[in-house]
Image (spheres, rainbow, N blue to C red):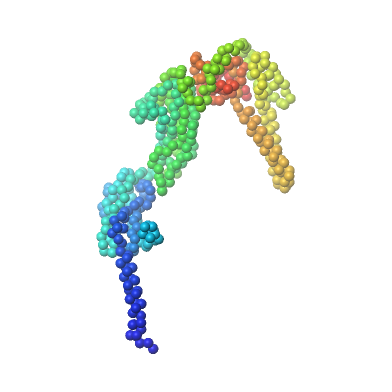
Amino acid sequence: MEKPAKRFRKNIAGLLIIFFISSWTALSAKVSWAHLWNMKFNPTQDTIFTEEDNSFFVEIENVTPDSVQISVNSLPPNVSFVSQKKETVLIPREESKGGGYVHGTRIILWMRFTKTGWYKIKPIDLTIDGSFYSIPVETIEVFQNPRFIHPEINIVFQNQNIESAKRNREKLLKINSGDHIVFTVTARYMESVQNIFWNIPENSIFTKIKEYEFNSGNKEKNFITQFQNVATFDWQPLSAGEHKLPEIFITATSYNGSVEDIQCPVYKFNAEKTQHFIHNAQEDNPFVYAFNDAEKANSSAKKIKVKPQEILDLYELHVKERHAFIFSNAAAERKEAEEFLGLPSDYHEPSLFIFNVLCFLTLAFIALTVLFFIIKKKTLTAVFASVFILCAVFSGIYGIRVKTVRGVFTGGQMSPIPENNMLTSVTIQPGSVVFIVRNAGDWLYVKHNDTYGWIPADSVCIIK
């Protein structure tokens, strides 16, 4: 049996090795001054909000949680200390230091703010293994909690003179009739935009140029406090006098989950009368279509006197042709009347009967396709599916023609703006068919051949 003294001499070498390893680990665990010098309590989230617990953290290498004591100094007004936490973590090391991970301690402090603004919090006192350290806190800006913020919308004018007048808070903004007022609707403090709708005032043209993808950010990670673009519009008042910007509304979801309808700010304009805006208009505007050339062409044309009853008879023939069956002579009667009045007669009035037949065939073939699919007749299913698609395409194309609003014009001037006695206008022969694009009060914006313009609404008989 081995004696105790002999066993002790045998194991002394192993005990010394364990002792030296423990001592080296304890010495290396001491946090370096270089590391402490660069430490700072940083906010966990990107944006700090009022009326909720916001956390700040710092990570210390080679330190265990039980060796750290925390002391929070006096806090600024409107700031309260909520709680603290210490936990063991693996901290990634820089590549210059060899990379990998090192064990350490993460300290988390929670604070609450009651008002918005910039805050400079005094350093946090730490005692690590009996040594005293003072760790600074990142200066932060606190924003209003989104749950208590109502969405906001604003308008930015691309016309610099109008934007400058708006910033100077002028009550009545000065423009010329026919000017293009381009503006962008912006919004903030909302989670999403559900819908945009507007009311267009009379005697004006209003177009949505572009709609943007609204980026509200993430409430917890990246709350955006700046205004974001929603949509850009082009508004053109067509008459002199006082105008209001079109009423624009946004249906938005706020951060508290409620859905709200918000109206854009209302701006008033005083439009001065001008006759020269047509020459300065951009080429992409719908009514810049060679009024001068058309005027010259029409001035030399022979004027044909048409009686009101003849226009009414022609209108009734259009209506008759639209509601006639396939083998009706309504189209021939209409062409004969147009040739007598010297009007082009190469257009066919879309028939409601043909449209209804196409819709019926589409429904019938889809029903047959479903039936043969159920009874597993693959060949017949493919055939009737092809016929159904063909009928659906023809129904859609023909339906567009049927739904297009057209009317018989009693004749007169077509002007570039809805005003009488314009210097640039086109004379349209009585009985001509015009395509109605939109209306504005007592005026209709129409297309005749390749020319666009305005005519009085009471001078058109709508073909129904």
Above or below for 89 versus 77: below
For image coordinates 32% across by 47% down, the residue present is 140
Pick the residue in front: 116 or 89: 89
Residue 197: image location, x then y, percent: 49, 33
User: Is 214 left, or right, of 456 in this rendering?
Assistant: left
Residue 137: image location, x then y, percent: 30, 52
Residue 349: image location, x then y, percent: 66, 24
For image coordinates 73% across by 43% down, the residue present is 380
For image coordinates 60% across by 15% down, the residue present is 430
User: Is 381 left, or right, of 405 in this rendering?
Assistant: right
Above or below for 21 versus 225: below
| Quarter occupied by residue 163 | top left
Which quadrant: the N terminus? bottom left
| Quarter occupied by residue 348 | top right
| Quarter occupied by residue 413 | top right
Which quadrant: the C terminus? top right
The outermost residue toward the bottom is 1
Q: How many marks?
A: 0
